[in-house]
Image (cartoon, helix red, strand yellow):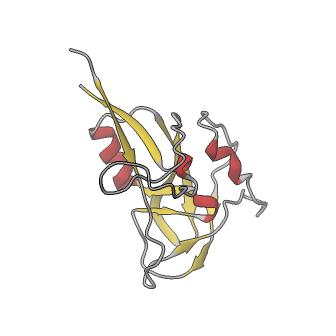
């Protein structure tokens, strides 16, 4: 049986005032890690465990965008993706300052370029998406 492609678009509602906001990833020496490398769709070897500062304190989330729309997920999200057999992602261990829970950078390894936002009828509205490349994760059902 042929496996059918399915794509997941992961969004983050940053308007909530009760949630946390994470800053740019840093290495163990406090130097910023290049945030743009997470947009290329390539497996990464960082040589360190990135650390995210909490720029705005609030409720911890299982999924959020850190600075530069870097997707950061809790270990529970990793387990969910494993149960769904989502393969075209890399979970890079990360730390969130002040939190002992397991967090990861969700590095999408298959990038789908999306240039406009679909309307309710599925047709393009002509409105460009922001950083859509970092939000789309491919996954096959079968």
Relative placement, left or right, of 96 versus 85 is right
Relative placement, left or right, of 52 versus 118 is right
Q: Position of residue 113 (x, y in %)?
A: 54, 40
Q: Position of residue 18 (x, y in %)?
A: 42, 84
Q: Residue furthest bottom?
A: 17
Q: Position of residue 8 (x, y in %)?
A: 37, 45
- Is 138 placed above or below 67 here? above
- Looking at the rendering, in which quadrant would you find the C terminus? top left
Q: Residue at point 50% right, 54% down?
A: 126
Q: Residue furthest top?
A: 1
Q: Residue at point 44% right, 78% down?
A: 19
- Residue 7: quarter of image: top left
Q: Residue at point 63% right, 70% down?
A: 53
Question: How many tags in the picture?
Answer: 0
- Is 89 placed above or below 15 here? above
- Looking at the rendering, in which quadrant would you find the N terminus? top left
Relative placement, left or right, of 1 versus 101 is left
- Residue 87: quarter of image: top left
Q: Residue at point 37% right, 48% down?
A: 123
Q: Position of residue 99 (x, y in %)?
A: 50, 70
Please tell me which residue lies in front, 97 or 14: 14
């Amino acid at each position: 049986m042929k496996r059918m492609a399915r794509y997941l678009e992961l969004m983050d509602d940053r308007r909530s005032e009760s949630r946390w906001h994470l800053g740019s990833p840093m290495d163990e020496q406090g130097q910023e890690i290049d945030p743009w490398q997470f947009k290329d769709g390539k497996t990464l070897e960082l040589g360190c465990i990135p650390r995210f500062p909490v720029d705005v304190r609030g409720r911890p989330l299982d999924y959020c965008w850190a600075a530069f729309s870097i997707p950061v997920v809790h270990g529970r999200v990793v387990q969910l993706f494993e149960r769904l057999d989502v393969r075209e992602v890399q979970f890079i261990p990360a730390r969130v300052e002040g939190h002992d829970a397991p967090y990861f950078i969700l590095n999408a390894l298959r990038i789908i370029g999306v240039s406009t936002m679909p309307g309710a009828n599925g047709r393009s509205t002509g409105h460009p998406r922001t950083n859509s490349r970092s939000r789309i994760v491919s996954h096959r059902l079968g």
